[in-house]
Each structure stands twice: as structure tokens, then as C-alpha cells.
Image (cartoon, rainbow, N blue to C red):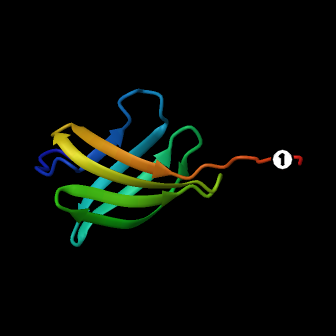
Amino acid sequence: RMGNSNPFVGQWTASDGLSNVVLVIEEVSDGYSVMVVDQSDSEEAEVYDVEFEEDVLSFKIHWESNGQFVKYQFRLLSDNTLGVTYTFSAQETWLKVEE
């Protein structure tokens, strides 16, 4: 949005250019609203537990299509750069070890 002085507000994507995920952060009366969309298929993730503490915006998402959960922590580095720490669930296939 033009003229919004809150640097968190806006549309964000990974700096490596390899991700199709876009986050839209808006300021609302009780904090922040976050929308997360995979632009490759337009899937919108379920976003929950949005919190802002000590200059860190954190939230969790769930992708229904693959069951993956991601926990994000965003720290503002400059008006157009976020430092992002994230933890995600993964799925593997395991095989029984023959004794």
C-alpha cells in the first residue's frame, strides 16, 4: 500500500527466486493478518497463531495438499528485507531393517 509506514506490510517472497510462495502481510486492529499462497497452483495455506513480539512476526501454516506444516519467524532487516527462520515438517518412507 502506498504511504503505509509499517515496513512489515506488503507482499514478500524468497530472495533466491526459486520459491513460488508469496506472503501478504497486512496490519489489522489487533496485530497482523498473513496470507500465504503458492502461485504455482494458487493454493492458499491455512495460517494460524500469528503473533508479534519483540520485533519478530511469527506464524504457522499448513498446506492441505501435502500435509506439510511450517513455522515462520520474520525479523525486519531493512524496509524491504526480512530475515526469515523457518521449521517445516517433511515426509519420508522408511524400510524395515532385516535382522
Q: Position of residue 64 (x, y in %)?
A: 61, 58
Q: Quadrant of residue 29?
A: bottom left
- Dot 1 surroundings within 10 Å: few (below 14), some, or many (20 or more)? few
Residue 10 lies, with reference to residue 50, above or below; the image says above
Nearer to us in this view, 50 or 33: 50
Residue that mark 1 sits on: 97
- The relative height of residue 44 versus residue 38 in the rendered view (above or below) is below
Mark 1: which secondary structure?
Answer: loop
- At a point 17% along the width and 60% down the height, the residue shown is 54
Q: Residue furthest front?
A: 99
Q: Which residue sits furthest top?
A: 17
Q: Nearer the viewer, residue 59 or 42?
A: 59
Q: Residue at x 22, y 50 (%)?
A: 8
Q: Determine whether, in the image, residue 76 is placed left or right of residue 33.
A: left
Residue, x 23% and y 48% (percent of image)? Answer: 75
Instruction: Point out residue 18 in the picture as x, y percentages from the top left corner.
Output: 47, 28
Q: What is the total number of numbered labels drawn onto the structure image?
A: 1
Q: Nearer the viewer, residue 59 or 29?
A: 59
Q: Amino acid at mark 1?
A: Val
Residue 78 in the image: above or below residue 74: above
The percent position of residue 46, horizontal first and vertical second, equals: 50, 61
Give me the residue at 46% from left, 41% from top.
Answer: 21
Residue placed most toward the observer, 72 or 47:
72
Image position of 25 (left or right of 40)? left
Left-right relation of 65 to 76: right
> Percent x, y for residue 92?
70, 47
